[in-house]
Image (spheres, rainbow, N blue to C red):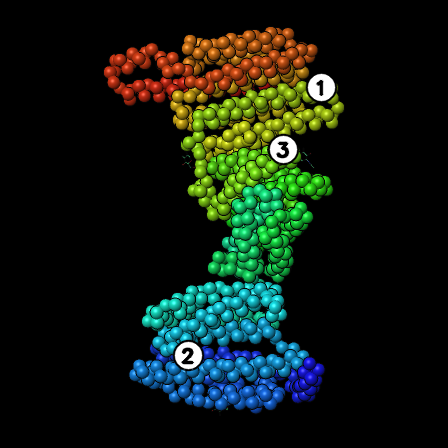
């Protein structure tokens, strides 16, 4: 031991003495020596290519160049060359090593030079013999060249001379390996030493691959740090890509295949292997020189395309969702929920996330993923990646242990939260830089949108994680954890809902948040409603768990399922947005919805229409009330909020309302209903009663027109459902609200006209038509006693309202509103009854039977008549509505 150290010391001193004058040159010498190894392979390869007749003239020329380079360097190293900064051998060991190289070199180079001109034309057996010599001769030369390199490196290390280090040696060896793989493939093609060449090829492949990984990701055991610099990273990504093109060709040659097949394959592929090795070697050479010195002068941002950014942003969002879901599975496991499924998802998730992070750091051109294009993004990603690595360690511990203690679950949740925060930092700076670099083109905006969709999945998974954490904490009675997790759960739930909403309606870019375009396709809207319903189930199940009752465990199991389903909905939506194929991939139910959905929509449109009038009446009452200005404002804002909510619900559906059913209906809502409603909502706050009333009439007109469309499309889908009659009942409610509004205006002296009496009279006419038929409505047949009795109740209630109207004054506003509400209640009931079609036969007019009789058969005749009748009915119905609208407008002072 002591002797060893003593010897080292002597060597060291000697070295210092010898090297001091030439120390700076030793690095250059090492580089040159390293390249020699590669050249031995390169020249052999070039020789074999000539023999195979593959681009023989060029390869002959290249071989001569390789030989000259090798020979010059060899003699420079033997004698030293100040002009090239190559030092003479620093020790005897090196000198004798070089001499051995020279001894091997002389016969080998002679072999090459003597035969290269005839090899193509030589008889097959002569050619084989020469190739065998070449394949024997190059290897000792390679080995001995490497011995020299190691000796030089050892001296440099002892003398503490700054060299470019192990990584550069490794990278240099990669170049040699590429040449050697080519050489071996061509030997196989030549039918020379096929088996040993093929097995060497396989070994080289493995070696290249693992070294490549080591170089890019670092190998701690070998003291190799990971690549961190931007340009080197991108250059290595180019190497990965080019190796990805090269490797499959090489892989077609295999020791398990018959020799003859390998020869044939290698022969076929040789030109392609050669063509692909070129860019690979160049990329590797560029990478090596960047290892030595990365001046940071590359600018990958400039090379980023819109789709390059898109892929990065989306990958990031996917990583966020996948990792959160993975952690959520872990938490489920800790509660022994859906253990098998959770374990599988956990394992898959860990690998998916690790691979995705690696792709974003290293680039994966085959999957169109560019390495992150700025140094700061790369650095952040690297930090995120190491956070994930330590999270994975904990997750793996969890998989292998029988029980996951609360402390472990808490720790993982906490780490996961930090990890997510980091990812969000990276994501937003990606979005920011993409927007900057693409100058906010629409294309970029849509990508952001898709990434927001993935974030929804992430939040969903996070909620489930938190619920599981709270459940575990409840059992462990860890109050503090419970409370903070509960708060986070609420915040995440609200963020999900806000995200959901802004995806639907769009949002202007602000506070660093990107612009979102509102969804334009009704199928997307329908899908989003499905998501919303499922999300509500998730929240419901969560609350049941959080209630901490005996049912909690069952609810937790249930939550695992609802989360899964919802997660699938949100991720499939995100990927449909990404691929811009929502139309094809999301089922659009416009043609298959039941009649009930159509009815609900017709009713919803009618209710919104009536509500516009009610809102005006409420607003006028509030203004006239005796509250403070502040209270009044608060109340009016609440009314405004209701209007906005109803607009949202009717446009996008809600817990109780369906989404718009057809594209035409949705577009009409967005284009013609929404603007007047927004105007109206604004005017409510404005104060003066009659502006709002005027605006409300525009809302009514827009909704009338929408209702026409709804009824037309509904009737086309379900010809026998009495949509018109249902709408007539809705119009009755509208007329009641309108009447009361006018009465309130009159009482509070917003108007001096007693228009309410005129409108009430119109109500009564419609009331009669609904019973006896008229205005395109059929009479109530005697087979509908339910309708008849409810009609009578409406009759009574409307009489009461009329009565109240007779002596209007401030005193009886309350009773006016009460009798209005009572009447509306009865109208709601009859409207439900009107939805039921009358028994067949009752709705037929007698003369239709007559027509059947006269015409004898005539199905088509009857259809024609029915159609005419229907058209007339529609026209008069909409006439009636128009009249009422005109009346409303004309009534304004
Ligand atoms: C190698 O270089 C030496 C010295 O420069 C020269 O004498 C020799 O001819 C060269 N050999 C070849 C094969 O070029
Ligand atoms: C040799 O080294 C000197 C000083 O380090 C440097 O200026 C010169 O460019 C080098 N020459 C070559 C050929 O590398
Ligand atoms: C979370 O939301 C629920 C339901 O909205 C509410 O009852 C609860 O008080 C909230 N908890 C916290 C901590 O905010
Ligand atoms: C998405 O597809 C539609 C037609 O299906 C097309 O009009 C639109 O331009 C596409 N958007 C993008 C960003 O490719
Ligand atoms: C249903 O949607 C599809 C695709 O959007 C459309 O082609 C079809 O006309 C729609 N049907 C109805 C009844 O609106």
Which residue of the protein is positioned furthest toward the right in this rendering?
628
> Label 1 neighbourhood size at 10 Å, few (<14), some (14-19), many (20+)?
few
In the displayed structure image, the side of residue 811 where residue 735 appears, left or right: left
User: Which structural element holds mark 2?
Assistant: helix
Of the numbered discs 2 and 1, the one sitting upstream in the chain is 2
Q: In this view, does 252 lie to the left or right of 14?
A: left
Say which of 852 and 202 sits in front. Answer: 202
- Which residue was labeled with disc 1? 625
Secondary structure of the residue carrying numbered label 3:
loop
Q: Give me the residue at 47% from left, 85% from top.
A: 68
In the displayed orientation, state which residue is furthest to the front. Answer: 402
In the rendered image, the vertical position of residue 743 relative to residue 88, given as above or below: above
Q: Mark 2 points at which residue?
A: 46
* Residue at mark 1 to residue at mark 3: CA–CA distance: 50 Å
- Measured along the vertical axis of the image, is residue 772 above or below residue 654? above
Q: What element carries label 1?
A: loop
Does the CB distance between marks 3 and 2 fall below 8 Å?
Answer: no
Quadrant of picture, ligand 3: top right
Residue identified by numbered label 3: 550
Residue at 65% across / 18% down in the picture? 750
In which quarter of the view is residue 737 placed? top right
Q: Which residue is drawn at 64% across and 33% down?
A: 549
Q: Quadrant of residue 158?
A: bottom right
Q: Where is residue 856 in the image (x, y as percent from the top left)?
A: 24, 16
Q: How crowded is mark 3: few (under 14 residues within 10 Å), some or many (20 or more)?
A: few
CA separation, marks 2 and 1?
99 Å
């Amino acid at each position: 031991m002591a002797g060893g150290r003593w010897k080292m010391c002597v060597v060291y001193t000697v070295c210092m003495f010898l090297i001091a004058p030439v120390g700076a040159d030793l690095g250059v010498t090492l580089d040159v020596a390293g390249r020699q190894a590669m050249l031995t392979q390169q020249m052999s390869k070039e020789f074999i290519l000539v023999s195979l007749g593959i681009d023989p003239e060029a390869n002959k020329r290249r071989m001569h160049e390789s030989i000259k380079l090798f020979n010059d360097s060899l003699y420079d190293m033997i004698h030293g060359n100040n002009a090239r900064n190559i030092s003479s051998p620093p020790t005897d060991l090196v000198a004798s090593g070089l001499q051995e190289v020279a001894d091997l070199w002389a016969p080998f180079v002679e072999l090459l030079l003597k035969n290269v001109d005839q090899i193509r034309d030589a008889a097959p057996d002569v050619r084989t013999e020469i190739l065998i010599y070449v394949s024997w001769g190059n290897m000792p030369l390679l080995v001995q060249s490497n011995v020299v390199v190691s000796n030089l490196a050892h001296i440099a290390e002892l003398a503490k001379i700054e060299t470019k280090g192990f990584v550069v040696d490794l990278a240099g060896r990669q170049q040699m390996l590429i040449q050697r793989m080519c050489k071996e493939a061509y030997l196989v093609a030549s039918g020379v030493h096929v088996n040993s060449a093929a097995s060497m090829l396989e070994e080289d492949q493995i070696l290249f691959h693992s070294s490549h990984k080591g170089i890019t990701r670092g190998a701690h055991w070998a003291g190799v740090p990971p690549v961190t610099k931007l340009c080197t990273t991108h250059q290595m990504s180019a190497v990965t890509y080019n190796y990805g093109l090269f490797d499959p060709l090489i892989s077609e040659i295999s020791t398990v295949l018959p020799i003859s097949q390998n020869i044939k394959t290698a022969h076929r592929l040789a030109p392609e292997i050669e063509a692909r090795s070129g860019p690979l070697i160049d990329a590797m050479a560029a990478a090596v020189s960047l290892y030595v010195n990365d001046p940071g002068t590359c600018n990958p941002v400039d090379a980023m395309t819109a789709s390059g950014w898109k892929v990065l942003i989306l990958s990031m969002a996917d990583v966020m969702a996948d990792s959160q879901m993975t952690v959520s599975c872990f938490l489920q496991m800790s509660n022994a929920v859906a253990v098998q499924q959770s374990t599988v998802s956990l394992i898959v998730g860990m690998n998916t996330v690790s691979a995705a992070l690696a792709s974003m750091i290293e680039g994966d051109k085959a999957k169109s993923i560019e390495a992150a294009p700025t140094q700061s993004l790369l650095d952040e990603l690297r930090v995120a990646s190491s956070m994930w690595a330590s999270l994975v360690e904990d997750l793996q511990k969890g998989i292998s242990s029988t029980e996951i203690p609360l402390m472990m679950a808490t720790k993982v949740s906490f780490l996961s939260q930090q990890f997510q925060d980091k990812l969000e930092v990276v994501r937003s700076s990606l979005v920011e830089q993409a927007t900057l670099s693409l100058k906010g083109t629409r294309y970029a905006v849509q990508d952001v949108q898709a990434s927001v969709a993935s974030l929804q999945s992430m939040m969903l998974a996070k909620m489930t994680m938190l619920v599981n954490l709270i459940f575990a904490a409840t059992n462990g009675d860890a109050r503090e954890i419970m409370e903070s997790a509960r708060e986070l759960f609420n915040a995440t739930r609200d963020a999900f809902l806000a995200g959901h909403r802004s995806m639907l309606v769009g949002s202007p870019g602000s506070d660093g948040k990107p612009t979102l375009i509102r969804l334009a396709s009704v199928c997307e809207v329908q899908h989003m409603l499905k998501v919303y319903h499922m999300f509500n189930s998730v929240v419901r199940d969560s609350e049941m768990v959080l209630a901490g009752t005996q049912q909690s465990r069952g609810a937790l199991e249930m939550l695992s399922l609802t989360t899964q389903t919802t997660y699938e909905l949100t991720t499939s939506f995100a990927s449909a947005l990404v691929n811009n194929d929502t139309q094809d991939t999301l089922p659009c139910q416009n043609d298959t919805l039941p009649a009930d959905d159509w009815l609900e929509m017709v009713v919803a449109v009618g209710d919104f229409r009536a509500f516009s009038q009610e809102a005006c009446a409420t607003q006028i009452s509030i203004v006239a009330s005796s509250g403070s200005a502040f209270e009044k404002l608060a109340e009016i804002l609440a009314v405004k909020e209701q209007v906005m909510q109803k607009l949202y619900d009717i446009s996008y559906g809600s817990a109780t309302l369906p989404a718009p059913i057809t594209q035409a209906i949705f577009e009409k809502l967005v284009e013609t209903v929404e603007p007047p409603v927004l105007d109206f909502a604004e005017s409510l706050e404005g104060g003066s009663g009659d502006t709002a009333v005027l605006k409300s009439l525009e809302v009514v007109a827009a909704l009338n027109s929408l209702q026409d469309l709804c009824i037309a499309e509904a009737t086309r889908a379900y010809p026998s459902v009495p949509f018109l009659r249902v709408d007539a009942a809705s119009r009755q409610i509208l007329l009641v609200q309108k009447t009361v509004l006018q009465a309130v205006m009159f009482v509070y002296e917003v108007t001096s006209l007693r228009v309410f009496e005129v409108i009430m009279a119109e109500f009564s006419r419609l009331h009669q038509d609904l019973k006896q038929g008229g205005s395109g409505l059929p009479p109530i047949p005697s087979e509908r006693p339910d309708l008849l009795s409810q009609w009578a109740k409406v009759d009574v209630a409307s009489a009461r309202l009329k009565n109240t109207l007779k002596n209007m004054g401030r005193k009886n506003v309350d009773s006016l509103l009460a009798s209005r509400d009572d009447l509306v209640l009865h109208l709601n009931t009859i409207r439900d009854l009107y939805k039921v079609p009358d028994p067949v036969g009752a709705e037929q007019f007698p003369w239709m039977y007559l027509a059947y009789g006269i015409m004898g058969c005539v199905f088509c005749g009857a259809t024609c008549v029915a159609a005419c009748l229907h058209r007339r009915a529609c026209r008069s119905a909409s006439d009636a509505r128009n009249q009422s609208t005109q009346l409303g407008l004309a009534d304004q002072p």
